[in-house]
Amino acid sequence: MSDYLSAAELADLVGCKPNQRAAMTHWLSDNNWRYVIDKNGLPKVARAYRDRKLGLTTDKKTEKYDASPNLEAFA
């Protein structure tokens, strides 16, 4: 299984036919989804991004920094 949605899966998400690349791109842009265009003109959306955007994952965001400062660093 690829890390990116197939044309059929993306068309199902967007509500168009798999060969309607402009409609897919327009919908993704209007709904503020991140995507890239491949060499064939098909927008590519990562499966993990789709899962997070739709709330399908149970992964919690990890905090980049600790909640409190490390006071031992100043000793």
Image (cartoon, rainbow, N blue to C red):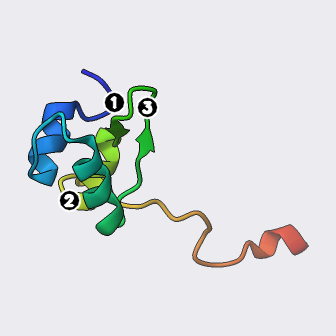
Pick out the residue farthest to the right.
Answer: 75
Mark 2 vs 1: CB contact within 8 A: no
Does the CB distance between marks 3 and 1 fall below 8 Å? no
Name the mark nearer the viewer: 3 or 1: 3
Q: Residues within 10 Å of mark 3 (few under 14, many from 20)?
A: few
Q: What type is the residue that disc 3 sits on?
A: Asp
Residue linked to disc 2 = 54
Q: Where residue 33 is drawn, which disc sits there? A: none
SS of the residue at dot 2?
A: helix
* Sequence order check, earlier mark of 3 and 1: 1
Please, is residue 59 above or below residue 8 in the view?
below
Question: Dots 3 and 2: beta carbons under 8 Å?
Answer: no
Sooner in the amino-acid sequence: mark 3 or mark 2: 3
Residue at image x 43%, y 39%?
37
Query: Please, what is the three-letter code of the amino acid marked with disc 2?
Result: Leu
Q: CA distance from mark 3 to mark 1?
A: 14 Å
Tell me if 24 is positioned left or right of 67 in this view.
Answer: left
Amino acid at circle 1: Asp
Q: Is residue 26 left or right of residue 62?
A: left
* Quadrant of residue 47 within the rendered picture: top left
Mark 1 = which residue?
3
Q: 6 and 25: which one is in front? A: 25
The answer to which of 34 and 2 lies nearer the viewer is 34
Residue displayed at 21% across by 32% down: 7
Alpha carbon distance from label 3 to label 2: 23 Å
In the displayed structure image, the side of residue 66 where residue 31 appears, left or right: left
Secondary structure of the residue carrying numbered label 3: loop
Crowding around mark 2 (Cα neighbors within 10 Å: few <14, some 14 to 19, many 20+) is few
